[in-house]
Structure formats: structure tokens, C-alpha cells
Image: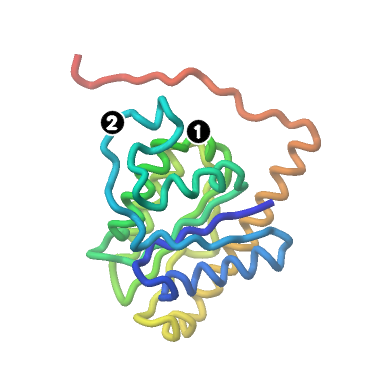
Amino acid sequence: MKVLLFNGSPKAKGCTYTVLSEIAKTLEENGVEAEIIHVGGHVSAGCLGCGYCAKNGKCINDKDILNSVVDKVKEADGYVFGSPVHYAAASGDITAFLDRLFYSQGGYMAYKPGCAVCTCRRGGATATFEQLNKYFTINNMPVVSSNYWNMAHGNTPEEVMQDKEGMQIMRGLGRNMAWMLKCIEAGKAAGVPMPEKEAKIKTNFIR
């Protein structure tokens, strides 16, 4: 079993990396492979809504990190997306990345556990956390939770590590993600079928 953790911060080893590292460490301690992928600073544009990916299996924009991680995304068993708070929202890089990732590869991520984490100096974490969770709930993904909202506070990695409750939340996420993955694996081994999938119904409000 493997979980991919995406760092949406422009800083490769900043506050967001610090909390993702705590989750990754806990996953490894619970027998789940973990890999942190730095997205921040490696995204060139948002989604164009052009439909190229639906026909070709990858994004038309081949100038940044997205297409290079597609194979890993398909093979992974779970996902963690992390972001710092920028103006009470997720970073522009992780937002553009997730828009394109879910639009082009959402089918491969469906029914796999996901969770979001965010870091902030002081405020805006709740709005950021809510923004990131919307990707899971539109894509048939079980959402992994901890014992509080998935956020940690601090302006430097050292300050984040002083947020004892925040770091405990991250360890809880790692344990809960590992537990959920093992439950899914046990269900498959016991012959529990995947949920029945209906054909998508779209109802427009203007007719």
C-alpha cells in the first residue's frame, strides 16, 4: 500500500512539508509506504476546460509537473494534499494542480481515501481546509479525518512543531489513513464488492 502526499507550498521544506512529514512518518510506522511530492513552484497554469485529457488521458499542458506524476497517482492507494494559507485560501499552485488532476485523473482516484491538511501563521485555515475537502466529496472518495480539523499553526517549521495539538492531529491522520487502507484491503479479500455505480445524471437549472 502506498500514499502520495502533495506539498502545495512554494517552499519545499517549509511548514506544510513539516506536517506532511509527520503524516508520512506515521504511515511508514504503520506499514504503509509514503512519498512526498513537491508541487509548489512547479505548476504553470490552471485548467483550461478544453477536454483534451478526456480524449488523451493526460493534460494538454505538458510544461509542468502534472503529467509526470499521473502514473504514480493511478497506482497509489491514498492521497494527502497539503497547502499553506494564502489570503484565507489554498495556494494558487495546489488549486491549479488539483483542478487539473481531478479533471483529468479523477476516475483513477475514486473510492480511494484522501485527506487535506493546511498550515497558517494565524487565520484562514478553516476556509482553506474546506476548499480542499471539496475535491474528495465530488469524486466518491472516503475522507480521512483526525481528532480535530487538519491544521497546524506556525510561521516557521520550528513553530509548527511547537503546535503540539497540530502535530498530534497529523499523527492521527497517518494512523487513520493506514487503518482505512487496511480495512479496504480486508474488504476486498473478503469479497466485499465495490459500490454500485450509476450513470451520471446532470440536471441543469436553466432549461
Q: Say which residue appears at 61% left-offset and 44% top-offset.
A: 75
Q: Residue 46 at x, y = what percent?
A: 28, 46
Q: In this view, does 151 lie above or below 76?
A: below
Circle 1: element type: helix
Give the label on residue 50, or none.
2
Please rate how many residues cluster around mark 1, counting C-alpha atoms within 10 Å: few if below 14, some from 14 to 19, many from 20.
few
Instruction: Give the side of residue 200 with respect to residue 187, left or right.
Output: left
**201 or 70: which is nearer to us?**
70
Q: Residue 79 at x, y = what percent?
A: 54, 52
Residue 51 seen from this side: yes
Query: Which of the 4 image quarters holds residue 203?
Result: top left
Q: Say which residue appears at 54% left-offset and 64% top-offset.
A: 147
Q: Say which residue appears at 36% left-offset and 42% top-offset.
A: 100
Q: Would you name the residue on which mark 1 appears?
A: 107
Residue 149 seen from this side: no
Q: Quadrant of the C terminus?
A: top left
Circle 2: element type: loop
Q: Say which residue appears at 29% left-offset and 41% top-offset.
A: 47
Give the label on residue 141, or none.
none
Query: Which of the 4 image quarters holds residue 35?
Result: bottom right
**168 or 36: which is nearer to us?**
36
Q: Is residue 156 above or below residue 101?
A: below
Which amino acid type is marked by label 1? Gly
Q: Residue 89 at x, y = what percent?
A: 28, 59
Extreme top residue here?
207
**177 or 44: which is nearer to us?**
44
Q: Do the residues labelled 1 and 2 touch (CB within 8 Å)?
A: no
